[in-house]
Structures are given as C-alpha cells and as structure tokens.
Image (cartoon, rainbow, N blue to C red):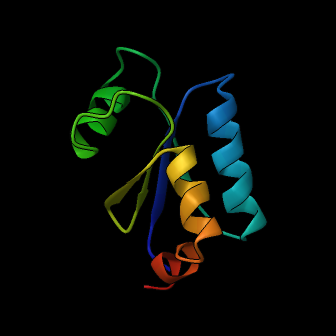
Amino acid sequence: MPKVEIYTTPFCPYCDRAKALLARKGVHFEELDAPHGSAARRSAIERSGGRTTVPQIFIGGRSIGGSDELAALDRAGKLEALLAT
C-alpha cells in the first residue's frame, strides 16, 4: 500500500470526515498537523499545487485533493485502485 499523508487542523469537520473514511477502509495514514502559517501548511500548499484548504491528502506522494475529492474517488470505486498501487 502506498504511503497516505493527510494535512489537517484541529476542529476541522472535513479533516475528520476524510480520516474517518480512511479508517473505515483500514488505511494507515500519517496525519500532519498544519495550522495556518506553519511550515507544514506551507508544505501542503506547495505539494498540492497551491491549494490552501485542509485537509490535503496525498496517496503515494500524489495530491488527490481534500475530503470531497477523497469521497468522490471512493464513490466512483477508484480509491481502492489508488491504495493498491
């Protein structure tokens, strides 16, 4: 399974939703605390091509977007393929 990273902030319902989906799938992920103005947040913005919102999710180093994009991949049946590579 490729490395899964998720940049989050406390009290973020979208972050919680994305983490819950990954947990339901049995996916081990690395959570990176990325409050506004932090080095982690700057890294997430750079790695994601300029996206400034959280969560920012990376699978195998590839940006897949945030919570909505993760859920869309799951609904389309494409998340498992990304996680299997």
| Residue 73 placement: quadrant | bottom right
Vertical placement of residue 83 versus 67, above or below: below
Picture coordinates of residue 81 (x, y %)?
50, 83
User: Which residue is at a point 23% across and 34% down the rendered structure image?
Assistant: 50
| Residue 24 placement: quadrant | bottom right
Vertical placement of residue 8 versus 68, above or below: above
User: Which residue is at a point 51% across and 38% down the rendered structure image?
Assistant: 55
Nearest the viewer among 1 and 79 is 79
Nearest the viewer among 6 and 17 is 17
Q: In the picture provided, is 9 more to the left or to the right than 47?
A: right
Instruction: Return the residue found at the far front.
Output: 76
Picture coordinates of residue 35 (x, y %)?
47, 20
Instruction: Return the residue found at the far top.
Output: 37
Picture coordinates of residue 54 (x, y %)?
48, 32
User: Which residue is at a point 66% across and 60% down the rendered structure image?
Assistant: 22
Q: How many marks?
A: 0
Nearest the viewer among 13 and 75 is 75
The quarter in which the C terminus is drawn is: bottom left
Vertical placement of residue 25 versus 69, above or below: below
Picture coordinates of residue 27 (x, y %)?
64, 68
Vertical placement of residue 11 versus 16, above or below: above
User: Which residue is at a point 21% across and 42% down the rendered structure image?
Assistant: 49
